Image (tube, rainbow, N blue to C red):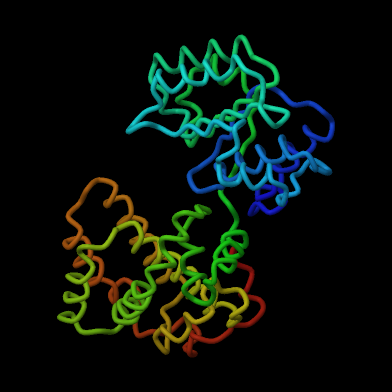
Amino acid sequence: MTLAALYGQEVAKEQLRRALVEGRITHAYLFAGPPGAGKKTAALAWAQALNCPYSRQGDACDFCPACLKLRERSHPDLLWIEPAGQSLKLEQLQEVRRRAVYPPHEGRYLLVVLVRAEELTPEAANALLKLLEEPTAPMVFVLVSDRPEDLLPTIRSRCQTVRFGPLPRAAVLSFLADRGFEGPQAQWAAALAGGNLERAKKLVSGDPKRSVMLRIWSGVWQAPARQRLELAQEMREWEGREVVETFLDWLRDAWVWQRTGRKDLLHHPDLPEHLPRRLPSPEKLAALRRRLVGARKALDQNVQRQLLWEVLLLRWPQIGLEEGRSGSGKDSRGPVPASRKNILL
């Protein structure tokens, strides 16, 4: 994959392209950012850009034999090192030192990519530090890390940091669309993924879950207490934060739909089909949101899930409905006057 083909991360891509175009290649880079932001893919694309004989404007051609071998991680001038078990070990860094004695076989640079660099053992970290203090040209290190603060400060100071942020929803949707996932399920996965491509891919493959969650969502508004208890029991084995984050995102859409009546502003355009005919007032929706945020905090404290869902679902109508009417007395499911639309979406 070329740098240009990476999803989002325009600042990081421009930083790398400019370095190659201007000939300012440093001996060590730290690709830092949250999980699933595309750092490993970017490291491979950067390796291609550095060793592609036909690179133009700071990017690889992605078609030549060198690019194909780099993409498959079979190029002789690429050392791709991931943790052996739970950590990056001294033996793996010693192998890098042995290889660094020789010049690149085919490309311009010997590329060493350390994945999950924060997992270096103390001995491996010291060995890496020596390699960084005495760089062997032409050699480029790329340290990929979700937690750069866990690296030794002396290692961080010898690397040029390239920062990766959580991907915007549009980039995640593009990623999913390229893999054949579109529609409400992809919208849900993108909203819930938090900018993490790996999580989005995992979520979108579980198609039945969204349908079940929509059924539960539809039932919590007006279903009898016994049915809501059954729903709570059904939810007990689910990943708690996933449920809460989904309901929070759907609650946000309910609020936007109530205030504007515009599907183009919704994260989930099919959601109005699963809302009660009359929604509670904005104040009641805000109260529901506060209760969901409280549930999320409780989950972080290892509360018993089924008890949490039972309390939440049993009290949901009392928190939220109040006859299902806003102060105007009109059906609150449709749009409201423009004077009331000045809300933070």
Q: Residue at x 60, y 17 (%)?
A: 157
- Residue 337 spot, x, y in % from top left: 63, 82
- Residue 260 drawn above or below residue 179: below
Q: Relative to 219, is 305 on the left or the right?
A: left
Q: Residue at x 70, y 31 (%)?
A: 107
Of residues 239 and 107, the one nearer the viewer is 107
- Residue 204 drawn above or below residue 167: below
Of residues 119 and 238, the one nearer the viewer is 119
Q: Relative to 122, is 23 on the left or the right?
A: right
- Residue 269 spot, x, y in % from top left: 54, 79
Q: Relative to 326, is 168 on the left or the right?
A: right
Q: Residue at x 54, y 65 (%)?
A: 176
- Residue 151 drawn above or below residue 35: above
- Residue 57 drawn above or below residue 284: above
Q: Residue at x 50, y 72 (%)?
A: 253
Name the image quarter holding residue 179. Answer: bottom right
- Residue 292 spot, x, y in % from top left: 35, 61
